[in-house]
Image (cartoon, rainbow, N blue to C red):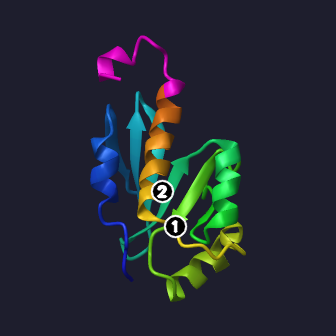
Amino acid sequence: MTNRFLWLHGFLAALPGAESDFKPEWGWTRYKVGGRMFAAVCQNERGEDFLLNLKADPVEAQLQRASFWRVFPGYYCTKHCWNSVYLCDPGADWAEVAARIRDAKSDAEGELPEALLRDMCSRAHALTVAKLPKRLRPAMGI
């Protein structure tokens, strides 16, 4: 299995005020700002990164799901304001994901551009920062 987005962990960790931890029982590396999660990279049983969960604006989330086969409603998250992104090359693993995660099925055929995924990550961070109390923002340099 090949992960096309090897830059992802570094990009998420470099966002202002971002902190990360690993939740072993879930197999998730969670990215938070001000104690609130904005992204999570999920591992499969083999310890490979295969899904990314991102906070999203509900309208944008629907448009992304309709446009790109890799994007579907958030796995183990609130479906209307979280998206999941399949990180691996298409193939057997995608069939496995689609079989296990009923919301992963998609009629969309578009390939997700790397620049758009970077923008989705930045927007997830910005949405979470906007919900933080103002007293926390200066402490994080935001």
Q: Please tell me whether residue 29 is drawn above or below residue 86 in the rendered image.
A: above
Please, what is the three-letter code of the amino acid marked with disc 2?
A: Leu
Q: Please give the range of residues in magenta.
A: 130-142
| Residue 11 sits inside the magenta stretch | no
The residue that appears at 56% across and 59% down in the rendered structure is 84
Picture quadrant where residue 25 is located? bottom left
Q: Where does label 2 land, which residue?
A: 116
- Estimate how packed mark 2 is, as few (under 14), some (14 to 19) or many (20 or more) residues with alpha carbons within 10 Å: few
Picture quadrant where residue 47 is located? bottom left
Marks 1 & 2, CB-CB < 8 Å contact: yes
Mark drawn on residue 112: 1
State the CA–CA distance, disc 1 to disc 2. Answer: 7 Å
Q: Is residue 138 left or right of residue 120?
A: left
The residue that appears at 49% across and 22% down in the rendered structure is 132
How many numbered badges does the structure rendering display?
Answer: 2
Q: Secondary structure at mark 2?
A: helix
Please, what is the three-letter code of the amino acid marked with disc 1?
A: Leu
Residue that protrudes farthest toward the top in the picture: 135
Query: Picture coordinates of residue 115 (x, y %)?
Result: 42, 58
| Residue 135 sits inside the magenta stretch | yes
Query: Picture coordinates of residue 141 (x, y %)?
Result: 30, 22
Q: Please tell me whether residue 55 is drawn above or below residue 134 in the rendered image.
A: below
Depth order, front residue of 78/61: 61
Q: Secondary structure at mark 1?
A: loop
Which quadrant is the C terminus positioned in? top left
Query: Picture coordinates of residue 45 (x, y %)?
Result: 43, 74
Q: Is residue 131 left or right of residue 87?
A: right
